[in-house]
Image (cartoon, helix red, strand yellow):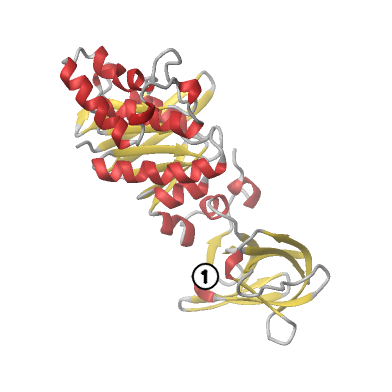
Amino acid sequence: MPELDLVGVSKSYGNIQALTDISLHVENKEYVCILGPSGCGKSTLIRCIAGINKPDSGKILIDGESVEQIPIEDRRIGYVFQDIALFPHMSARDNVSYGLAVRHAESTEITTVTNEMLDLINMRDRSKAYPRELSGGAQQKLAVARAIATGSHLFLLDEPLGALDAIVRAELRYELRKLASDLGLTVIHVTHDQEEALSIADSVVVMKSGRIVEVGRPSEVYASPRNLFTANFVGETNLLEGKVLETDGSKCTVDIKGHTIRVSGFGEVGQRVILSIRPEFVSLTTPTVVGWKGLIKQVTFLGNLNRYVVEVEGGIDIIAEVSTAEYSTGFRVGESVMLSFEDVHMLLFDYPGEGLEKEISLE
């Protein structure tokens, strides 16, 4: 079963630097999601792994063996595209068996493996159907089965669910994850869908402008990111600019436009900092409890949540999300509230040298 190592991989197209010094280790049977904004180099990276694109520099190793000189067809890598790319003139069965037929496998092997794949995706009864007769989700499952049938154990999925409806996409991502686990596959799954990445990955790789910004478990990159870009890009967060007033050991008192707050972290007195807190960790109560006084500017109903934009003194807008089950009646626009924050859920970052806007930019 394959392990993958990328060592200093770079790739440019003319004056455009698509990848810069990418290094990454993927464990055997690991499911890795590469997450980042459009144009950050996600697809270029897996195309280099597949052999479709050739890196300008760096090494790509599968089980410790360099693959730069190995032709695409001999790398034994399964590749599933966003646009599905099934053969429209072939039945479901013929699409699945195509790779085996190209390799001149024995007819008995082709029949056995094809039947196993169709059973695996619960499509034996649709084996004679053509792609145009199948739903988008069924077509994508067929594309995955075709890739698995070739005997590959390293799979590259390039936005495989991007063209599907939201409900189908949600269902299929869990099917893909289960399939990978059951078969012991190593998977690199490119996506711009944060929920998709967080819900199925063993590890999440966050990319920006052709570089890897951060790598970690889904819970780590969401709850305790090491980078401001990750904190802002993965999920939603409030970023509050402030200055350290005092520090004592492991905690700081930070001034944010006249409001003070205690937060875990290190800083020097007078240092500019950024405080990050997720909307779900901002508590709202009626104005009888100590906290920051605010006014509800906007209310958005999200089904299980109410999302509030609250303006506090100093012209600061803070987003809060409150469970509709916890507070079913909710607050109304124009209503006064008190905001409070739990120290354990607040993250303190140094103010970026090139400015906050540049740091969290998607480009």
From this view, report whether residue 287 is shown above or below residue 9. Answer: below
Q: Looking at the image, which residue sits at the far front?
A: 125
Q: Position of residue 140 (x, y in %)?
A: 44, 31
The residue lying at 38 percent from left, 54 percent from top is 217
Q: Position of residue 222 (x, y in %)?
A: 48, 57
The one nearer the camera, 340 or 83, is 83
Q: Quarter-wise, where is residue 141 in the image?
A: top left
* Left or right: 350 in relation to 92: right
- Quadrant of image for the N terminus: top left
Q: Quarter-wise, where is residue 254 in the image?
A: bottom right
Q: Is residue 106 visible?
A: yes
Number of dots carrying numbers: 1
The residue lying at 22 percent from left, 14 percent from top is 103
Q: Is residue 72 visible?
A: no
The one nearer the camera, 191 or 312, is 191
The one nearer the camera, 307 or 54, is 307
From this view, report whether residue 330 is shown above or below residue 248. Answer: above
From this view, report whether residue 16 is shown above or below residue 7. Answer: above
Give the labeled residue for mark 1.
Answer: 345
* Left or right: 328 in relation to 200: right
The residue lying at 69 percent from left, 86 percent from top is 289
Q: Quarter-wise, where is residue 346 in the image?
A: bottom right
Q: Position of residue 101 (x, y in %)?
A: 25, 14
- Quadrant of image for the C terminus: top right
Crowd rating for badge 1 (residues with CA inside 10 Å; few <14, some 14–19, many 20+): some
Could you tell me the amino acid type at mark 1? His
Q: Position of residue 43 (x, y in %)?
A: 46, 30
The residue lying at 52 percent from left, 35 percent from top is 162
Q: Looking at the image, which residue sits at the far right?
A: 334
Q: Secondary structure at mark 1?
A: helix
